[in-house]
Image (cartoon, grey):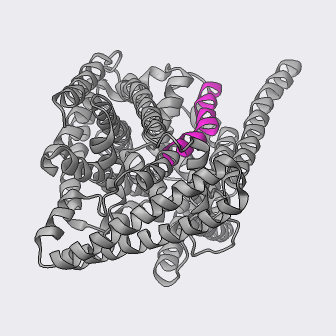
Amino acid sequence: MWALRAHYTAVVTRSYIRVLVTWVVVLAALYAFQVLFS
Amino acid sequence: MHPVDWAIIAIYLVWMIWDGLRLTKRSHELEGYFLGGRSLPWWAVGLSVMATQLSAVTMIGTTGQGYADGMRFLQFYYALPIAMIVLSLTLVPFFHNAKVYTAYEYLERRFDVKTRALTSLLFLMSRSLALGVVISAPAVVLSVVMGISVTSTVLLTAVPTIAYTMFGGVQAVAWTDVKQMVLIVAGLAAAVVVLVLGLPNDVSTVEALRLAGSTGRLQTFDFTWDLTNRYTFWSGTIAALFLFCSYFGTDQSQVQRYLTTSSVDEARGSLLMSAYWKIPLQALVLLVGVLMFVYFVFAPSPMLFNQVHEREMREGPAAADYSALEQRFEAATASRAAAARVASRAESVGDTHSLTVASAEFKKREAEVRAIRGEALALVRKATGDAAYNDVNYVFPTFITQHMPTGIVGLLIAAIFAAAMSTIAGELSALSTATVIDFYRRFVRQEASDAHFLRVSRIATVFWGLLASIVAVWAVELGSLIEVVNQFGSYFYGSILGVFILAVGFPRATANGAFVGLIAGMTAVGFAATYTNVEFLWHNVTGAVAVVVVGLLVSAFDRRSK
């Protein structure tokens, strides 16, 4: 039960980390876009 | 408009009614009608949430904003992914496990009935007024470009939406949203393709973007710390975080959508879809506006985009002044186009010195064009008596009807209708749910059959739909006051979020503390809005903080006195 719960928490945490990484990448791309075309 | 375009719009409207009405599965049960039997897939709910958020005001207002002001507005959405993670960790599991119909129902379980009733009432008041504006803004613009009355465009938008929402409930709303979302994205993609293909042959897309960038229109980061500036990186990441947590976490139109999923994980999945796609989608909308700016650098640009006002100015008492302005405008736009071509040529051959000189000239000419347009708008303001008049909402519809190929015009006007309808349907369904669950079933009749509650829900849907349509027609007369009505909801969002923070985050918060805190939060926001120049996004922070602080203080006294 404990192992199952730990596995579930890890899966959910990974999905949040993916969102955060995508967020940083998108903002960095937008900043690069701004610098490139200004 | 060409008959083919009219036919496409007619087919779209008929398809939506037919599709919405056939999606009435399980809508004879209360849980099926309000929550889709808690069985909708996460991806459909995710698209539905995004469709509700992307209103027709976004399609016409935001593209116009991109044209006039560039992509600065994008900063408003930077906190959205973080808000989605916060909500997935906090409110979503609470609501889902509580098996509630409305977000406010949870507040009675945690606090008391008066806190629930007040928050639900605030939702009903602010949403019903805002819904009127959601119908009105595109109706006014569409009436000008389609050449029909505002009442007709209000009815064309509202009647089909009321019909399928009334019969199909949230299930019809969600599934039609999915199709409408596909249509909206297809329409925006078609606009980008037409705009890029419409550039002169000797101007590449990169050169066009460089021209837009030289005027500051591709600026997506503004790090200045200024509470009176609406769109900065800080207002977008700090103040907007509170707004999005409140909107997606406590607004019934959003909460109801993720309650239709079968599990907490599915609900999280639907929210995280917005976390991934909202910023790119909004960037696409604004990019359409920026590309329209470049398009009109090379193509003949109207001085005023609202044809009705343009005609009035030509024929009115200020016709001579207007004509003189128009001649200056034509000369300035011609000089601007010439400078743009020189800059573009210099860039393509890699001549850095000429590029710098030509870019400076282009910026100068652009400022000149902008100033003349400003004078023309001031003339209209004087003639109409509307001090805040602006025509940015007419830029995209004018471009669609005058520069798009036949067929695409119909597709894009249908996409604007789709954006309006998806928002209206979501709000109507939420208004009806809150009316029936938080008021009728709570205070009027607690025990009755599902059939009875469904009848009342359908009546509530029609009532809110008609009220919003009346507000929409009335809002046309409001002119710039529309902005005030539109921001009405944002005066409550922070305070409502504060109550939910107390409910979920502070076990020692009492019912009296939450209620007094809510009143204190709204008072603080009212004070800040009246006596300071702080931009409205920051009111969300003020409201939430005031509710939590006052709520905890009152709770401490409350517990001691007991």
Residue B382 position in % (x across, y down):
24, 80
Q: Quadrant of residue B89?
A: top right
The structure residue drawn at horizontal position 22% and vertical position 56%, both measured from the top left corner, is B471
The structure residue drawn at horizontal position 16% and vertical position 29%, both measured from the top left corner, is B3
Up/down of B107 relative to B447, above or below? below
* Residue B510 visible to the viewer: no
The structure residue drawn at horizontal position 42% and vertical position 48%, both measured from the top left corner, is B58
Can you say which quadrant of the picture contains the N terminus of chain B?
top left
Residue B313 position in % (x across, y down):
18, 70
* Residue B25 visible to the viewer: yes
Up/down of B272 relative to B427, above or below? above
B172 sits to left or right of B188:
left
Is residue B238 or residue B99 the one in the foreground?
A: B238
Is residue B562 or residue B373 the one in the foreground?
A: B373
Is residue B415 or residue A6 the one in the foreground?
A: B415
Residue B358 position in % (x across, y down):
60, 63
Can you say which quadrant of the picture contains the C terminus of chain B?
bottom right
Q: How many marks?
A: 0
The structure residue drawn at horizontal position 39% and vertical position 53%, both measured from the top left corner, is B61
- Span shown in magenta: B264-286
Q: Quadrant of residue B355?
A: bottom right
Q: Quadrant of residue B19?
A: top left
| Residue B285, magenta (yes or no) | yes
Is residue B280 or residue B448 the one in the foreground?
A: B280
